[in-house]
Amino acid sequence: MLMGMIIAAHAQTPSEKIKAVENNLGGWVKIADSAGWNIKDRMAFYHVNGLSIAVIDNYKIVWAKGYGWADTAEKRPVTTSTLFQPASVGKSIHAVATMKLVQDGRLDLSRDINDYLRSWKFPYDTASHGKKITTRELLGHMAGLSVHGFDGYKWGAPLPGIIQILNGQPPANNEAVRSFFEPGKRFEYSGGGYTISGLVDQDITGQPYAKYVARTVFKPLGMKNTFYQSQLAGNGKSNLATAYRYDGHAIGCKYHIYPEEACGAALWSTPTDMAKFLTELQLSLINKSNKILSAASVRQLLTAQSKEGNALGFFIEKKGDETYFHHDGLNEGFVADYTASIQGGKGVVIMANTDLAAYIDITEEITNSVATVYGWKGFYTPVMKREVKVADSVLKTYVGRYKFSDGNEQHVDIYLKNGKLWFHDSSSPVPWLMHFSSDTDFFFYEVLFNIHSFTKNAGGKIDGFMIKASDGEFKVKKVE
């Protein structure tokens, strides 16, 4: 039995459960007879400077805790009051604020968005094939629109207004938000679409978007540590985390500024405040609290619009016998993630001042640990492997450069360091430690489910390795 599962099974008091979560992190694979990872060790391994967690159990926030540094130069620690940029996690908040307009009879999800837009009109063209875009399609990423996300602006740079952003006009640094293909055809994630939806809300209410959401969502739920960039003056500026790259280094300023509000980019919050938001939705579903939306309205938000699991402001996923709603977010130097159950009132919110999630995901490892410790049945089912010791003489034969195909610049360097074999794909900023299940078969924590095996030529020398994935297999040739 895994040591982490033993720890989880005996964790009874709140402090014991916190300790169990901190010492039971795990990825898609677990090595037999090994303990789970420690959260501080994983933060050091991934160069994560600061991280904050809030855990939900039985419809209540049972604990929240900060780790590491909000700012390394100032030696300012992360606390439960430290504000992070949760990025696209804010799309869930926007969806709830928009659904309140629907519930109040002020917005029809199925009508043309231009019926509500006053300050700007969406410029339909031939790409939309004569079909009109609805707010339901905007919220479900089914509108066929461009602009996946936004890069933000460094301090002192001129900031565009929302119309300039939508039209891709200077000083906006994004392309115009326009049709890729006809609406309703398929899923295509679009932060640009959410920016349009935010303008719809603003034009309907006649209020600045940030003010409307604060009054409709933040105030009723007591989210006192949640603000949009435009609301930060005098509100918690001393509690802001500093943004860092995947390697732990600064991004060139304390953080980027985002004028794009509805897509979540401009939001600042804490895991505790986001957990308040999630528990309200969970309680609304069982009619125990309906401070913003009715159970019927929440169910409508959590209804998937396609096989991709994209709901309205949320993503839906079934694991084991339970269904969960979740969202993640990535800004320059920040990452956030939450998972919450539709039944039973379980969940976790994680925020960190790193943009590591572009490559590997410590938030998933933490979520897996929370799921194990708090008994989310069927949520975390890792592949079990037994690691073997490979002789140094064999490992040395694997060292070298490998190429994916002729004419392709992508390559892999395999090298020995401190007695361990490392694999560095040129498309990744970080190398991966290689684990062996036999003398020739290896796997990574960072690459899900693929089977990797070294191969030999007729002369018995290593000539490459095979990658077997769900969509086929191919050989990567050794060239040096």
Image (tube, helix red, strand yellow):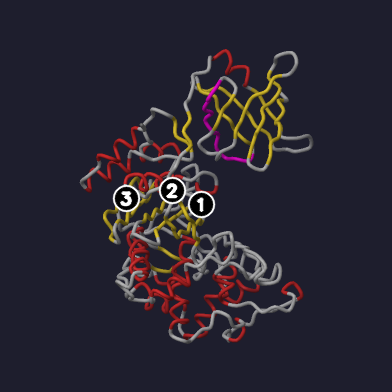
Instruction: Identify which residue is drawn at 69% across, 71% down.
Output: 179
Are dots 1 and 2 in contact, CB under 8 Å? no
Q: Nearer the viewer, residue 412 or 285?
A: 285
Per the rendering, the mark at residue 105 is none
Per the rendering, the mark at residue 66 is 3
Residue kind at label 3, given as amino acid type: Gly
Residue named by callout 2: 363
Asked if 105 appears above or below 446 in the picture, the reply is below
The mark nearer the N terminus, 1 or 3, is 3
- Residue 78 horizontal/vertical position (percent): 33, 51
Residue named by callout 1: 252
| Side (left or right) of 131 relative to 53 | right
Q: Label 1 neighbourhood size at 10 Å, few (<14), some (14-19), many (20+)?
A: few
Residue kind at label 2, given as amino acid type: Thr
The mark nearer the N terminus, 3 or 2, is 3
The mark nearer the N terminus, 1 or 2, is 1
